[in-house]
Amino acid sequence: MASLNTNITAPAAFAQAIHHLRAVGNAVLNLLVSIAEFTPRYRAIQYYNALSDEDLAEMGMTRADVVQKVFGGRMYL
């Protein structure tokens, strides 16, 4: 009679390596987010998003105009 056994659990060393790889990936991603949030453009986007639609209308803008205002010709939408 033939028998087949399959070990579906990963060895502990492999699982630990995956855990460390995810931790490094998360750290890199968090660093990139922090760098992006430090830029003046990010702060400008936050400023305009905090305004009401009426305040934006007084400036002659809509929410759709915010990205074009902040990024100018650097974004192609």
Image (tube, rainbow, N blue to C red):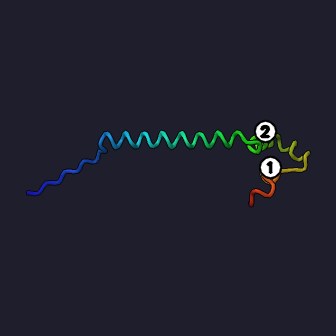
Q: Earlier in the sequence, mark 1 or mark 2?
A: 2
Q: Nearer the viewer, residue 52 or 7?
A: 7
Q: Nearer the viewer, residue 7 or 18?
A: 18
Q: Position of residue 4 (x, y in %)?
A: 17, 54
Q: Secondary structure at mark 1?
A: helix
Q: Residues within 10 Å of mark 2 (few under 14, many from 20)?
A: few
Q: Quadrant of residue 2?
A: bottom left
- Classify the position of the C terminus by image quarter: bottom right
Q: Residues within 10 Å of mark 1 (few under 14, many from 20)?
A: some
Q: Which mark is residue 11?
A: none
Marks 1 and 2 sit apart, C-alpha to C-alpha, by: 14 Å
Q: Is residue 69 left or right of residue 5?
A: right
Name the residue rendered at 61%, 43% in the picture. Answer: 32
Name the residue rendered at 91%, 45% in the picture. Answer: 58
- Classify the position of the N terminus by image quarter: bottom left
Q: Quadrant of residue 33?
A: top right
Q: Amino acid at mark 2?
A: Ala
Name the residue rendered at 51%, 43% in the picture. Answer: 25
Q: Position of residue 55 (x, y in %)?
A: 87, 42
Q: Which residue is mark 2?
A: 50
Q: Position of residue 11 (x, y in %)?
A: 29, 43
Q: Position of residue 14 (x, y in %)?
A: 34, 43
The answer to the question of whether label 1 and label 2 lie on touching residues, with beta carbons closer than 8 A, is no
Q: Is residue 53 left or right of residue 24?
A: right
Please, which residue is most extreme toward the left here? 1
Q: Is residue 34 left or right of residue 75?
A: left
Q: Which residue is mark 1?
A: 70
Q: Amino acid at mark 1?
A: Val
Q: Secondary structure at mark 2?
A: helix
Can you say whether 2 is above or below 56 in the image?
below
Mark 1 vs mark 2, foreground winner is 1
Q: How many marks?
A: 2
